[in-house]
Image (cartoon, rainbow, N blue to C red):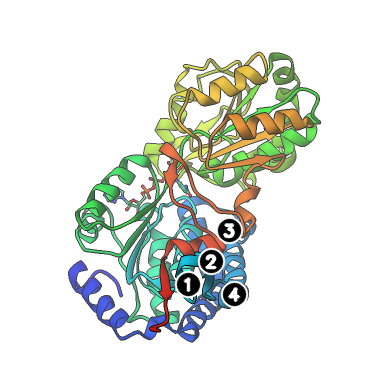
């Protein structure tokens, strides 16, 4: 299934298939998940090659963050699906004595998944796993900004999955706009907040519920008296993965001036440790997706004193892993989500000032903190709001399948992964049964 039939025809065809009830059976759902797993194991190398073509993504990183990640999501779902689908009993008040109540999960119908370019396999397929597990028909729309991956997915998915129930529609703004005019039963969108608003407006026409997985600036607070070699290694590994083009990458560091000075040196050696003296020659270091983003990022490099990196080359869209020190809170790099390999260090006096700094800004998708102090942990938990809060190891929260993944406020609405995906793509229906006599 590619672009040929009109979006209205695609949706009508899927709706007819949904109406037959075939996607509701648990055997259809598990069969689809197993087929998707088969696709990822048999054709993982093709997908890794497409990711290399689109993003210069290294093979190991492609498997770790996209292919194997999605396989783990499938395995977790297959392992627990029966248990998750079991009717959930509900207590009945005494005045309804004799009645019994429970909830069941109903599939929604035909759902739309719209994915971005930065993790173009994982961010299309992980929601699709939830949509299939919940017994829905799916329209999957990969990002046109990762064209090789979009093509590979459009080619492979119909060969492995039930092509009458899962359609891939490739395309850019016109194609997505036409899709959004259709009535879906849920729209799951991952990308920036400007398009998120377009999606939500279109969904409102049909009263279609939405999940919006958006981005923003995710801060990393570094407390005094933490092991800065460990902090630097973990910050560098998660910031510079995929050349910084990760929605949950630590966007900037907040720390006191003395810690900032010590951390600078550790970050410079952590980058060397990861990518060698010349990251441009390291096969595991990625490239910027396109020239528009390259130019935007190159314009942010002057926002502070360069500790390491700072070099860039437009024809290969290479930007070195860069750490900037002494960055002012209102500098250009602090006014937008960076979404690239630039890590600013912003100095604050103490924890109070860090909390105030975070609260004055949009609620982040993730908040990270490195601390040995329980009080700091408790205060950050109670006094800040973010999609997720992770102590010690940035990005790791989204690899825990029992944790919900999603944003709050400007970073999005709704959540997924594991059981939360099933809830997102189902309706939890209340069932009450009172005896006739
Ligand atoms: P993108 O440009 O690939 O856009 C995402 C999708 O929206 C694409 O499929 C695209 O075709 C579609 N789209 C673009 N313009 C449209 C329009 N006018 N109307 C309808 N559809 C349109 O990706 P992006 O937005 O550049 O992605 C980066 C952003 O996504 C960052 O802000 C990042 O933080 C965020 N993000 C969030 C998550 C998350 O899980 N929360 C994950 C990855 C990226």
> How far from the left and from the top, in percent, is residue 191?
40, 47
Disc number for residue 91: 2
Q: Are marks 2 and 1 in contact (CB under 8 Å)?
A: yes
Q: Quadrant of residue 370?
A: top right
Note whether ligand 1 is within 8 Å of mark 3: no
Q: Residue at x 76, y 21 (%)?
A: 262
Q: Is residue 376 left or right of residue 408?
A: right
> How far from the left and from the top, in percent, is residue 249?
57, 40
Q: Which of label 2 and label 3 is nearer to you?
A: 2
Q: Residue at x 74, y 28 (%)?
A: 375
Disc number for residue 101: 1
The tag earlier along the polypeptide, 3 or 4, is 3
Q: Quadrant of residue 86?
A: bottom right
Can you identify the residue that label 3 sits on? 62
The tag earlier along the polypeptide, 2 or 1, is 2
Under tag 4, what secondary structure?
helix
Under tag 1, what secondary structure?
strand
Under tag 3, what secondary structure?
helix
**How far apart are the alpha carbons under marks 3 and 4?**
31 Å
**How far apart are the alpha carbons under marks 2 and 3?**
47 Å
Q: Which of label 3 and label 1 is nearer to you?
A: 1
Can you identify the residue that label 4 sits on? 83
**How far apart are the alpha carbons under marks 3 and 1?**
46 Å
Q: Which of label 4 and label 1 is nearer to you?
A: 1
The tag earlier along the polypeptide, 4 or 1, is 4
In the rendered image, the vertical position of residue 309 relative to residue 420, given as above or below: above
In the rendered image, the vertical position of residue 368 relative to residue 49, given as above or below: above
In the rendered image, the vertical position of residue 332 relative to residue 216, given as above or below: above
């Amino acid at each position: 299934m590619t672009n040929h039939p009109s979006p209205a025809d695609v949706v009508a065809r899927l709706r007819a298939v949904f109406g037959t009830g075939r996607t509701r059976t648990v055997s259809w759902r598990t069969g689809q998940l197993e087929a998707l797993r088969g696709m990822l194991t048999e054709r993982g190398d093709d997908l890794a090659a497409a990711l290399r073509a689109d993003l210069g993504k290294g093979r190991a990183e492609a498997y770790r963050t996209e292919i194997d990640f999605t396989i783990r999501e499938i395995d977790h779902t297959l392992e627990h699906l029966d248990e998750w689908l079991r009717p959930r009993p509900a207590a009945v008040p005494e005045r309804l004595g004799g009645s019994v109540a429970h909830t069941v999960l109903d599939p929604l119908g035909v759902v739309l998944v719209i994915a971005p370019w930065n993790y173009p396999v994982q961010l299309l397929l992980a929601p699709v796993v939830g949509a299939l597990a919940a017994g829905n028909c799916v329209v999957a729309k990969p990002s046109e900004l990762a064209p090789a991956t979009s093509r590979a997915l459009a080619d492979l998915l119909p060969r492995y999955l039930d092509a009458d129930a899962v359609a891939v529609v490739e395309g850019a703004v016109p194609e997505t706009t036409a899709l959004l005019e259709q009535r879906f039963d849920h729209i799951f969108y991952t990308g920036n907040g400007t398009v998120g608003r377009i999606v939500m407006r279109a969904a409102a026409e049909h009263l279609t519920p939405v999940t919006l997985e958006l981005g923003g600036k995710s801060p990393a607070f570094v407390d005094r008296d933490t092991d800065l070699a460990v902090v630097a290694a973990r910050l560098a590994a998660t910031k510079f993965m995929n050349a910084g083009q990760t929605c949950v990458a630590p966007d900037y560091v907040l720390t006191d001036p003395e810690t900032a000075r010590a951390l600078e040196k550790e970050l410079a050696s952590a980058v060397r440790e990861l990518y060698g003296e010349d990251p441009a020659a390291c096969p595991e270091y990625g490239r910027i997706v396109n020239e528009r983003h390259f130019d935007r990022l190159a314009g942010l490099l002057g926002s502070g004193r360069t500790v390491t990196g700072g070099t860039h080359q437009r024809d290969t869209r290479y930007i070195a892993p860069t750490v900037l020190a002494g960055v002012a809170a209102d500098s250009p790099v602090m006014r937008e989500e960076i979404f690239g390999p630039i890590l600013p260090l912003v100095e604050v006096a103490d924890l109070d000032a860090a909390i105030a700094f975070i609260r004055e800004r949009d609620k982040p998708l993730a908040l990270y903190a490195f601390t040995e102090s329980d009080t700091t942990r408790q205060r950050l938990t109670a006094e800040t709001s973010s999609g997720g809060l992770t102590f010690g190891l940035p990005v790791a929260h989204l690899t825990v399948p029992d944790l919900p993944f999603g944003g709050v406020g400007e970073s999005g609405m709704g959540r997924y992964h594991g059981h939360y995906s099933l809830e997102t793509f189902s309706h939890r229906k209340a069932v009450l049964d009172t005896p006739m006599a």
